[in-house]
Amino acid sequence: MSGSRAEAEQKGGSRQRLQVNEYKENQNIADTSLRPVQTTVLGVTAKVCLVPFSLSNYNTGQLKRPKSLLDKNSNSEVTCKKSKKAEIKKSCRRLLTPKMEATSSKEESTLQKSSLDVHAESNKWQYKSPSDTVVLSPDTESSQEGDSDEDTTPGLSAARFREMIKKRQPPESKRKKPKKKENETGCRRSMRLLKVDPSGVPLPAAPIQTVLEVDENPLIPPGPLEMTPENQDDDNALFKGFLQTWAEMSKTRSKNTEKELSSIKSYKVHLNGMVISEDTVCKVTRGSISSMAIHPSEMRTLVAAGAKSGQVGLWDLTHQPKEDGVYLFQPHSQPVSCLYFSPANPAHLLSLSYDGTLRCGDFSRAVFEEVYRDETRSFSSFDFLTEDASTLIVGHWDGSMSLVDRRTPGTSCEKLIKTSLSKIRTVHVHPVQRQYLITAGLRDIHVYDARCLNLSRNQPLISLTEHTKSIASAYFSPLTGNRVVTTCADCKLRIFDSSCISSKIPLLTTIRHNTITGRWLTRFQAVWDPKQEDCIVVGSMAQPRRVEVFHETGKWVHSFLGGECLASVCSINAMHPTRYILAGGNSSGRVHVFMN
C-alpha cells in the first residue's frame, strides 16, 4: 500500500507540474490579452474551444470502449476523478499567487459555463444521431479533469468536435447531360448498302464471281517462237521482204581490217557532220528501252532495241514512211537487258532477259530459237567467249555465271560457276585475250580467267575497289582491250589501264559526269566507240538534252544536240562499228538516230 501510494503521489506531482506549466503559459496569454479586462475575447473564444485537451498523448489507433462498459464503470471513474481533482486543486492553490488565483477562478467559471453549453449542444447531436457516439480516451479525460470540475462531455471526441465546427461545403454540381429529342430525325442510310429495294423487301444475295488474276508478264512457253510482229499483219508482204533482205545482207560480212586510229581532229569533223531529223526519230517499243544494238551492215541501217516489257523492236531506216519499217516482237516476258548481233552471222540477233531465257532471232528462218533457259535464275548480261559465237558466258543477278555451248543439244548450261560477287550487272570478254573477262558487281569489279573457273567459289585475278557506290557497267575497249571504262552512281566515269593484266590495273582518268538518272529513267552505261576506241559515248542529264563524247584522258570531245528532235534523255546508246551512226534510246521507247 505504501508503494502504491508513493507512486500515486509521484504521478500527482508530475501532473501538478504539468498543470502549473500550462497554467503559466495561459497566465502569460491572459496577462497580455486582458490588459483591458473588460474585453469579451475570452468569452467568445470559450464558446469555440469547449474543453481544452492535449493531443500529444492521443493514440489514434486506440480501440474505443463499448458503451456498455462505459456505463458499468462510470461510477468508479467519477469517484476517481473527483479525488484527483481535489488533490490537483490543493497543490495548485499552494503554488499560485493571489493574482493568479483570481484569474484562474475567472477562467474556471467561464470554462464551466462553456462546457455546460457544449454539453447541452452535444446532447442535441446525440439525440439526432444516437448511433454516432464517440468515447473519449483516458488521456483526453485526464486533460479535461485539470481544467473543469464537472465532466460535462463524456461522449465527445476530437473528430466529432471538428465535424461540429466544420462548415459544410456545398455539394459539387454535376453537369446534366442533354436529353435527346424524341422527334429528332436520324441519319439517312443507303438502301443499296442495306440490300433493300425501295419497297423494303430484302434483295437476294448476289452470286460470288471468281476473278482470275492475270499476270502482267506471263512466262513465254519454252521452245522456238515464230517471228511474228505484233504491229503488223501475219501475211504482210513488207515483213517478208524485210526478212529476205536482211538475210541476204548478213551474208556479206563487214570488213574487219585493223587500221590505225584517226586523229581527234578528223574524228571531231566526222562527229560534227552527224545530224538528227524527224525522219530519224521513231517509237520502236512500247516501254522503256534497256538495251540497243546496230547491225554491222554498211549499206543499210537496222537498229534493234530491247524494252523492259520483254519486247524486241527492229527498225529499218530505209523504209518510208518510217512506221512501216518498225517491227515489234515479244520473245521475253521481262526486261531485255542485253542485245548483240552475232559476230559470226549478223543474221542472228541474240537477246537475254531477266526471265531466265536467252534466245536467238534468226532472220533467215523467221524464228526465235531458245539457246539457254533456267527459270530458277535471273540473267543480267552475256558475251561471246569465242569469235565464232559458239560459246557464251552468262552473268546472273545472284552473282553466279553460266558457261553455255550452243553446239550441244538442249537448253541447259555446261557449267554453273559461283563467284565472290553478290550481284553481276555486266559481263564483257577481252577482245584479244579472250580467256579474260570482266564483271561489274554491286561495288567491286573483278577480272577472271575463264580457264581457271570451276564450280566452287572462284577468286578473281584482279579486283578494282575504287568505286564508292553502285556500279552500272564495265567494258573493255573494243579493238585492243587496253582500256576499261566503268560507270558508277557516284557521278564519275573511270578509265583504267588494262594493257598488262597482272596483279593490278591502275586507274588512269576520272571524269566527273552526272549519272543520277532517278527512278523512272534507265541507268547510264558508258560504251566505247568501235571506230575510235580511245573515246567513250554516254548519255547526259544536262539541258538541252544531249549525248556526250569524252576522250580517255578526260577531255570533252563532242555533244550531240538535236534541238526539238531530241527533247528527252537517251540513257542507252550504241555506235555503228564502221559507219558514223549513233542510236540512242529513251525511257518511252523512242529511238533517236544521228547519222551523216
Image: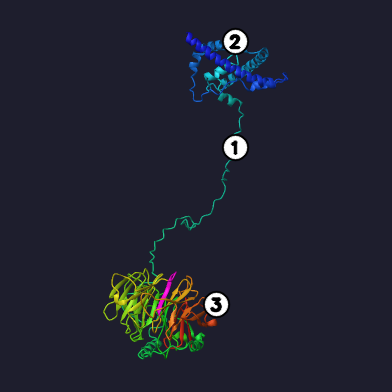
Which element is circle 2 on? helix
- Percent across and percent down for residue 124 are 59, 20
- Percent across and percent down for residue 24 are 63, 18
Residue 551 seen from this side: yes
Q: Looking at the image, which is closer to me, 471 or 324? A: 471
Q: Residue at x 55, y 77 (%)?
A: 543
Tell me if residue 348 comes above or below residue 490 in the rendering.
below
Which of the two discs, 1 and 2, labels the residue nearer the N terminus?
2
Distance, label 3 to label 2, CA atoms, is 120 Å
Residue type, label 1: Ser
Q: Is residue 143 left or right of residue 220?
A: right
Residue type, label 2: Lys
Q: Looking at the image, which is closer to me, 281 or 532? A: 532
Q: Is residue 263 magenta?
A: no
Which element is circle 3 on? loop
Magenta residues span 466-476
**Residue 416 found in image quarter:** bottom left
Foreground mark, 3 or 2? Answer: 2
Q: Residues within 10 Å of mark 1 (few under 14, many from 20)?
A: few
Q: Which residue is mark 2?
A: 90
Colour mode of the rendering? rainbow
Foreground mark, 1 or 3? Answer: 3
In the rendered structure, find residue 173 and report the number of the disc placed on it.
1
Distance, label 1 to label 3, CA atoms, is 75 Å
Q: Which residue is mark 3?
A: 543
Mark 3 touches mark 2? (CB < 8 Å): no
Q: Is residue 82 left or right of residue 246?
A: right
Distance, label 1 to label 2, CA atoms, is 58 Å
Which of the two discs, 1 and 3, labels the residue nearer the N terminus?
1
